[in-house]
Amino acid sequence: MIANSATEIDSSGLAKSYRPGDHESAMATRWREAGCFKANPHSKAQPFTMFIPPPNVTAALHLGHALNNTLQDTLARHARMRGMDVLWMPGTDHAGIATQTVVERRLALQGKKRVDFSRDEFVAQVQAWKDEYERVILEQLVAMGCSCDFDRTRFTMDPVCAAGVRAGFFRLFQDGLIERGRRLVNWDPKTKTAIADDEVVMRDVDGKMWYLKYPLSDGSGTITVATTRPETMLGDTAVAMNPKDPRAASLRGKKIRLPIVGREIPIVEDDYVVMSLAMGGDASDAKAEVATGFLKVTPAHDPNDFDIGRRHNLAVINVLGPDGAISDRHGWQDVSADAKAFVGLSREDARKAIVNWFKVNGLLENERPWKHAVGHSDRSGVAIEPWLSDQWFVRVTDERLRGAALKAMAPDQFEGVSPAGKAPGDGEIRFFPPRYAKTFQSWHESLRDWCISRQLWWGHRIPVWTRDAKDEALTQSTSLRGAEMVAVNSKWSALGAAHRMRKRDDGSVEESVCLPLELDHVAAQLVAVGFAQDQDVLDTWFSSALWPLSTLGWPHPEKYPDMKGMLERYNPSSVLSTARDIITLWVSRMTMFNRYFLGGKVPFKHVYIHPVIQDGFGQRMSKSLGNGLDPRDVIHSHGADALRYTLLDLTTDTQDVRVQIDMIDPESGETFEPEFMRAPSGHMVAAPIQKSPKTPSKTMVSTYGAASGLATPSAEQPLARNTSGRFDMGRNVATKLWNASRFALMNTPQPAREVDAATRPLLDRWMLSRVAGALARADRALSEYRFSDFAAAGYDLLWRDFCDWFLEAAKPTAKNDPAQQCVMACSLSSIVRMFHPAMPHISEALWSAVNKHAACAVRGLDMKSTDLLATSSWPVAHASLIDANAEAEFARAQALVEAIRNARGERQVNPKKRIKLLASAKASQVVALAGGVVETLAGVDGVLPLTHARSSTAASMTFEGEECWLDGLVDALDIGAERARLSKLLAERQRAVAGYKGKLSNAGYMAKAPPTVVQETQKMLLDAQAEVETVERSLRELA
RNA sequence: GGACUGUUGGCGCAGUUGGCUAGCGCGUCUCCAUGACACGGAGAAGGUCACUGGUUCGAGCCCAGUACAGUCCA
C-alpha cells in the first residue's frame, strides 16, 4: 500500500486522521449548495432569530468577533437541529467615523487629504475600502462555519437599510423627537466633527492647576480662581462661588473685571462650586484640597459651566474655532486690544501665552501639578473640546424612548419598582448574565440627549433641507419663542414633508424641511427656492439602532420580493449576543427605536453579554499592543473547529477570557513563547525583535514591533505571526472525536436494528444513561447561555465516558454482539450530533460514515437523519433512558478498576501483564454485575474467591473497606515500599475515622443535619473502620 | 469617584439552592510504541479555596470588613 497514511481510508470508511484543511471548505460548500441556512418564512416551525452585531468594515474580524460568532452559531445550529426555523441575519456596519478615519489615514500616506477630493470622489474611495473588507469579513464568517442566511446579507448603508434610516429619521423628526439645537458637544478638533458621549474615552493626564487672580471691578481687591484650562478664560462670563461660602455675603452683587479681555462679569452663587478646605469644604472630596472656592465660568467650553450659565442666565461666548484654536469668528465679539494677541493661537500655545500673561502681570498666584481625567476622541486620540455648535439631537430623554426602554426590562431584573405595565413588549427583555441589567438600567437613568449629527462624508446624509426663513409672517410668529422647532403648515407639509422653523440664537429664523424617501423628487424644488441639504451625516449608531428593523425591510417589507411577512415573524428576535460596552451604544438604542416604531415590540427577548478576550496578562487585545490574534491564523494552525471549541470552553459566566499569546517562527513554523517587556504605556508586550528558538542567530519582528514602529519587517527579519497554545485543546478534541468515530465504526459491522436498553448488560445501560444525561446537561447549559458547560458536556461524554470506558470495555465483545453494536452506533450518532453546534466541520465530515447506521435505533433515543448533519435532528432522550441504578453500579465497577489500576501503577507494572484478583464479597459482586468489564479494564484474567491460595508476592488492596489481593502483579515484593505505602494509607484512614467519629458525636450535627447526610457519614465511618482493620492486617502479614 | 467581576495546586479555569475524599485542561513525574487516537493510554505528586471576623451542627459557597487585580461608567 503506497497511499498517504493520513488520507488512507480504513474499514471505518474514514481517513486515518483528521486534517481540518481537507474538509472545512468542502463542508461549507455542501451547506451552501443545500441551502440549509436559509430561513423559511412560510415554515410552520417556531422561529429562532438572531441579528448579527454587524462588524465594522474597517478591518478584518478579530478574535473577539470569532468568539461572539462562535457563540451565535452554536445557538443557531442547536436551534436548527431542534427543528426550529432559524434566521441568523448577517451583515456589516459602515462605521462612519472609524472607516473614514482609516481611509483618511491611508490617503495621508500618499500625501493626500480628504479635501483634495470632491465629496463624491472621497466617498467612492471609502466605498472601495468597504467592498474589500466586507468581502473579507463575509469570507471569515464562512471560514468559521457560521450558519448565517448569507443570501440576506445586509450592509447598514445599502438601499434596504437606507430606506429604514430615512423612514426612522422622518418619523422621529415629524414627532418632534429629533431636533436641531445649539448645544455643547464633544468636538474632535482633529477630525473636526462632533462625536457621541460614548466615543469619548477618559484618560488620566498629568496636568497643572493654575491659580489666576481676577480683580474686582470696584478695585477692592482680587479673588483667585483655580483652573486646569486657563486659555478658556477669554470666554469667561462669570465667577461662581458656593452660597455657603463665608465670603459670599461680602462679595454678593460685586463684579469682576476680566483680565486681558476687560469684560465685566458677575459673581454668581451656585451649589455646584466646590468649597476650599479653608472655607469649610468637604475633606473627603479631593477637589476641595486644590479648590479656592471660586470657579471661573466658561459656558461655551465646559459642560458644567454651561449648566451653571443656564441657571444664571449667563452669556455664552465661544472663543475657539473648529480646529481648537482661539478664534474671534465663532461668537466672540468683545475682543480687546490685549486679547487680539491671542487670536489664532492653538489651544496649547494659547495656554502657555495666557499663563505667561498672568505671570508677567503679577496675577498668577500659584501653579501646581494636578492629575485629572480628560476626554479624548476614541478615533483620533486628541483631547476633545466641549464646543458649542448647531447639531441634530434625538430626544432620547423623552418618555416615549427612555421610558419605553426601562419598561422593557424584565421586572425581576429591575432595581427598584419596575415601571413595566401591561403594554405589548413591557417586561420582555432579559439579560444573561443578569448583572448586566443594571448597566442597562443605570445608563437610561442618567441619559442625555443623543447628538446624531457628524461632520463627516461617509454615512447617511441627514435628509433635511434648510434655509433662512423668508416669509415675514412666519418669522414674526409668536409661537417662535424659544429655540424649539415649531411645525409649519405649508405646501411642503401638504405634500407629506415635515416642515419646521426655529429661532436661532442671533434672532434669525431657520426653516427646515425633512423629506421621506418617497418625496425625494421634491428635493429639487426645495433647492430651487433656496433650501440646501444639511451637509452632515448621521451617527453610525443611528443606522445600527434600526438594524433589527431595516434588515427585515421595515417600513415596507412588501416592496422586497423575499421579505414579505419577515418583520412579523422574525422581530422580536430570540437573542442578541454582544459585548459589554455595546449595552449603552446599541442595545439601548435598538430597544428604544424598535419599541417606538413597532408599537412597543422589543427587538429581542434575551440579551447575552459575552466575555472580553484578553491576552495572557489580562490586557485587552489591541492593534497597537500587537497582542491580538487573527482568527485566520488560528484556523490555519489549528482548524476552525478547534478555534470554536476552545472559545466555547473558555466562555464562562463570570470571567473574561485569557488567551496567552505565542509566536510562530517564520523560519521553522514552530510555536514558541516570546520574550515580553514592559512598554512605555505600562503594558506588557512582546519585545520588538525576537530570536528564533531553533537558530538564535535568526531574528524576527513581533507584531508589537511592527505596530509600534520600533522594528520594520524585512526579508532577513520577517514578521512573526501570533498564535496561542490555548487552541491545542480544541484540536485535541477534534482528533479524539475523529478517532473515536473511526474505532466505533470499525467495530459496528452488523448492528442490530433495534435495541431495548432494559435488555442490555450493565455497560450498555450505563452508556445510554450517560448519553441521556449529557443531552440534558447540554440542553440546559445552552438554554442558560452557559457555553463552557455545554462544551464540557460533550467533552465528558465523548472522552471520559465513551472512549475511556465504553469503547475500552466493549473491545472484546462488540464485534460479536449486534445489539451492543447498535448501542455503540447510536451513542456515536448522538455524540457526533451533540458536537455539531460546537464543531460543525468535523462532525459534518464524519456524518456520511456515521449515518450509515441511520436505521439502527435504541428505544427511547429519538434521532432523525438527513444527508446533512446540519439539518439532522438533535437527539431527544426519554426519561426512561436515565438509569440511576446502572450509573450507581457502574460507578462501583469503575472504583474497583481504578483501585486495581492504582495498585498496578504504583508498582510500575507493565499494562500487558495479566493478573489474578482474589476478590472480597463486595468485589466479587461488582465483578459479576459488570459482566466482564472489570477484567477487561483492569487487566485481570482470573477472579478467584478470597479464600483461594495466593503466592507470597501477592499484594493487598482494599475495595469498599474490604481486603482483596492481587496475585501475579510482581515477581518479588518490595517489603519496604509495601510497608511505607500501607503505613501512609493507614494514617490517612485513621484520620478519616477520627473525623467521622467527631462528626457523629456532635450533638448539634446529629440533631440538625438531615438524616440522609448522617446515614452517609455512618456508612463512611464503617467503611473507613473496615479499611483500617484490613490495612492493619496486611501490615501484620507483611512482617 | 461610582458600578460590576475576580482572587481555588506552577499556569488557565469549574465548583447550580451550604453536606461524601474540592474537580477539569495545560504543565510536572513514573510506566506504556497494546491494530482508534502519543493531538494517545494507565497511574502519581501537587491546594491552610487572598486575608480578618461573623452566621451555622457544618462555609470554597452566606454576611461584614480589608488587600490586590481587571472591566465598564463618570
Image: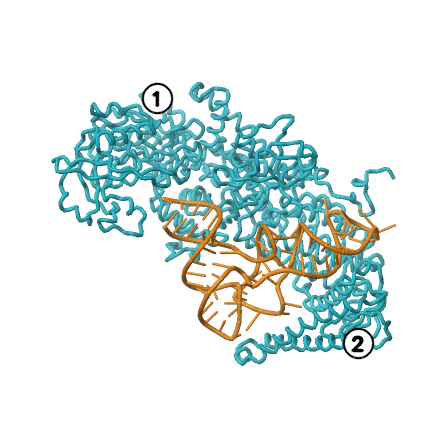
Mark 2 against mark 1, which lies toward the viewer? 2
Figure quadrant of the N terminus of chain A: top right
The residue closer to the viewer here, A632 or A677, is A677
Q: Residues within 10 Å of mark 2 (few under 14, many from 20)?
A: few
Can I make out residue A514 in this image?
yes
B55 relative to A849, above or below: below
Q: Colour of chain A?
A: cyan
The percent coordinates of residue A224 (x first, y second) are 22, 39
- Would you name the residue on which mark 2 appears? A1037
- Would you name the residue on which mark 1 appears? A527
The residue shown at (40%, 27%) is A520
* Chain of the residue on which disc 1 is drawn: A
The residue closer to the viewer here, A648 or A449, is A648
Q: Colour of chain B?
A: orange
A868 relative to A517, above or below: below
Of the image marks 2 and 1, the number of the one nearer the N terminus:
1
The residue closer to the viewer here, A32 or A1016, is A1016
The image quarter in which residue A62 lies = top right
Q: Is residue A494 left or right of residue A848?
A: left
The image quarter in which residue A379 lies = top left
Amino acid, disc 2: Glu
Can I make out residue A234 in this image?
no
Amino acid, disc 1: Val
The percent coordinates of residue A670 (x first, y second) are 69, 38
